[in-house]
Amino acid sequence: MMPELIDRFGRQHTYLRISVTDRCNLRCLYCMPEEGMVFMDQDKLLSYSQIIEVAATAAKLGIRKFRITGGEPLVRPGLDELIAGLSALPGVDDISLTTNGLLLASQAAKLKQAGLKRVNISLDTMDATRFKFIARRGDLNKVWEGVEAAVEAGLSPIKLNCVLLKGVNEDEIGRFLKLSMEQAMHVRFIEYMPIGHDDAGWRDHYLPLSRVLEEANRLGYTLEQAEGPKGSGPSENWRIAGGAGTFGLIHPISEHFCKSCNRLRLTADGHIKPCLYWVDELNVRPALGSPDDMEELFRKAMDIKPENHEMAALLAGDKQSHVPTERRMSQIGG
């Protein structure tokens, strides 16, 4: 019988998110400050061979899906080397990437060849001026070039992740809905999360995703509940009748999906986090070179994983000390 990673609440874990860097070539207003970020020294990062060693134990224990994240993962050179190593592990059937898309055009084909299956691309706006406001740097045209390169490379499904911010981009909901109708892509609307921003400013910009369905109804669309594309996870999925693609709603706060959580996270500096929104983490470095010790570390992660996060308490103004800080956010790769 295959070993399994099952926590105290009966949740089986089959998914590991791997952050390869805390660095990013954008400074999105909901993620990090525009200036003054202090990133970790490069010698603090796990090497690709070390990541593969950790992932090999994870695969032995039933992890079947890996997602590569950052920071922005494509700023780290040689990512295809890591993906090739992960895809060679026995039992692994899905490797995906979350990216802002700026560097994807030049890398999509070789990443696909190395074993990458699909990609999530952050796209919070379709307006070039607003893109500069939200991301504070970068070029929206480069993102679209990345999307096109992903399509050409055969990465599928392609998901476009849109973090909704009240008073910032909520007026573009209709444009994103139209995109999901016209293109064979999956648009995912994501609630703004209070990681490092658990103050009144965060609450001022928080927008529940019921707003998306309200806008779809206002526009006269007929909606059909849809089966999400591969890797949809906790997304609530819809299709506009007759549309080529789908759209999804991810509610980590208003309708948190903790009861079905099947994921762990490996930070860029080598810590297993049982929950992205909790401070507890386990250092993998002392276990490197010992498969038994590494396996024990994963089992300990099951023992300390909380039943649920409490981000909703922040929305109500009840700040909890166990919510991660902004410094940790850049290392987790959310």
Image: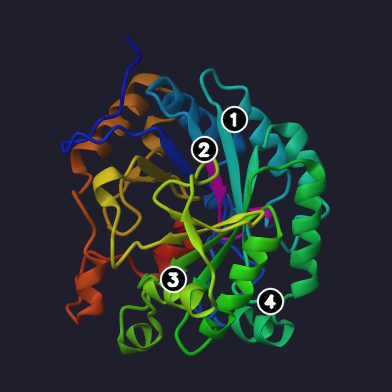
Q: Nearer the viewer, residue 121 or 290?
A: 121
Q: Quick one: label 4 or label 2, which is nearer the N terminus?
A: 2
> Residue 332, image x and y in percent?
45, 56
The mark closer to the camera, 4 or 2, is: 4
Element class at badge 1:
helix
Q: Nearer the viewer, residue 122 or 37?
A: 122
Q: Which mark is residue 66?
A: 2
Q: Residue at x 71, y 58 (%)?
A: 183
Q: Are marks 1 and 4 in contact (CB under 8 Å)?
A: no
Q: Quick one: label 3 or label 4, which is nearer the N terminus?
A: 4
Question: Is residue 73 something that shows in the picture?
Answer: yes
Q: Amino acid at mark 4?
A: Met
Q: Which mark is residue 86?
A: 1
The mark closer to the camera, 3 or 1, is: 3
> Residue 116, image x and y in percent?
67, 37
Q: Residue at x 41, y 85 (%)?
A: 205
Element class at badge 3:
helix
Question: Is residue 271 something that shows in the picture?
Answer: no
Q: Which mark is residue 126?
A: 4
Q: Nearer the viewer, residue 282 or 257?
A: 257
The mark closer to the camera, 1 or 4, is: 4
Q: Are marks 4 and 2 in contact (CB under 8 Å)?
A: no
Position of 158 compared to 334: left or right? right
Q: Are marks 3 and 4 in contact (CB under 8 Å)?
A: no
Q: Quick one: label 3 or label 2, which is nearer the N terminus?
A: 2
Q: Residues within 10 Å of mark 3 (few under 14, many from 20)?
A: some
The region drawn magenta spans 66-74
Q: Quick one: label 3 or label 1, which is nearer the N terminus?
A: 1
Q: Which mark is residue 213?
A: 3
Q: Quick one: label 2 or label 1, which is nearer the N terminus?
A: 2
Q: Amino acid at mark 1?
A: Leu
Does the magenta portion include 194? no
